[in-house]
Image (tube, rainbow, N blue to C red):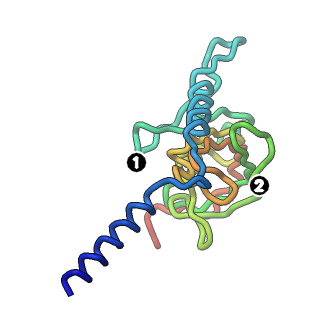
Amino acid sequence: MRNTKQILLYLLVSVLMVSCIKDDDSEDYTVWRAENEAFFNRMKDSIDPATGKHVYDSIPSLAYPQYYVLYREITPGPADNTLKPLYTSTVSVDYSGHLYNTTTDFDEGNMVFVVGRGTSQYSIIAGWTWAVMQMTVGDNWEVIIPWQLAYGANGSGSIPPYSTLVFDMTLKQIVKYETGANW
């Protein structure tokens, strides 16, 4: 009996060790990750030659202060509108998104969601949350989200792991301006 247990334990440990070994079919995202991070850093440091100022401003993540999203205003909302969504507000956003190295959108449309929660079908990536909370109705921004505040090391659907995402986002409406979590 003891011999059988030892053999089973040996087999279990062997299977676990083999399952941790990278097989030939798995992808290595080392180069992709480095390219995405290099792009983000180039955009962070890019200077408009006409003004001498940075092209993109940054919005720090409250949950992960070492990470931030970059944005540039394409079209501002009305000047008299200063109301920004809260973490619990319901908003309507028109958007299109693509990987940093292509102009082909992986997704586009309109989404109505609770800023800090998402919808019943979709959660919202952290980078979207931080960007939307800084926008006013009518603002149209280009937003660059690093992989750490997007889909991370796992990716999602057609979005590979470690992907820096570029969105065109317009805050269309604050549907419900919540002042507390009513979940």
Mark 2, residues whose alpha carbon is within 10 Å: few (<14), some, or many (≥20)?
some
On the rendered structure, is 166 left or right of 3?
A: right
Q: Nearer the viewer, residue 111 or 147?
A: 147
Provide the residue designation for mark 2.
Answer: 108
Disc 1/disc 2 C-alpha distance (Å): 27 Å
- Quadrant of the image containing the N terminus: bottom left
Depicted 152 relative to depicted 18: above or below: above
- Return the residue nearer the eye: 155 or 13: 13
Which residue does the numbered mark 1 point to in the structure image? Answer: 63
Could you tell me if residue 83 is visible in this image? no
Q: Amino acid at mark 1?
A: Ala
| Residue 128 drawn at (x, y percent) | 58, 50
Marks 1 and 2, the one that precedes in the sequence: 1
Number of disc labels: 2
What SS does tag 2 mark? Answer: strand
Q: Residue at x 57, y 45 (%)?
A: 28
- Picture residue at 72% right of the left edge, 48% below the top: 97
Above or below, 120 against 62 in this view is below
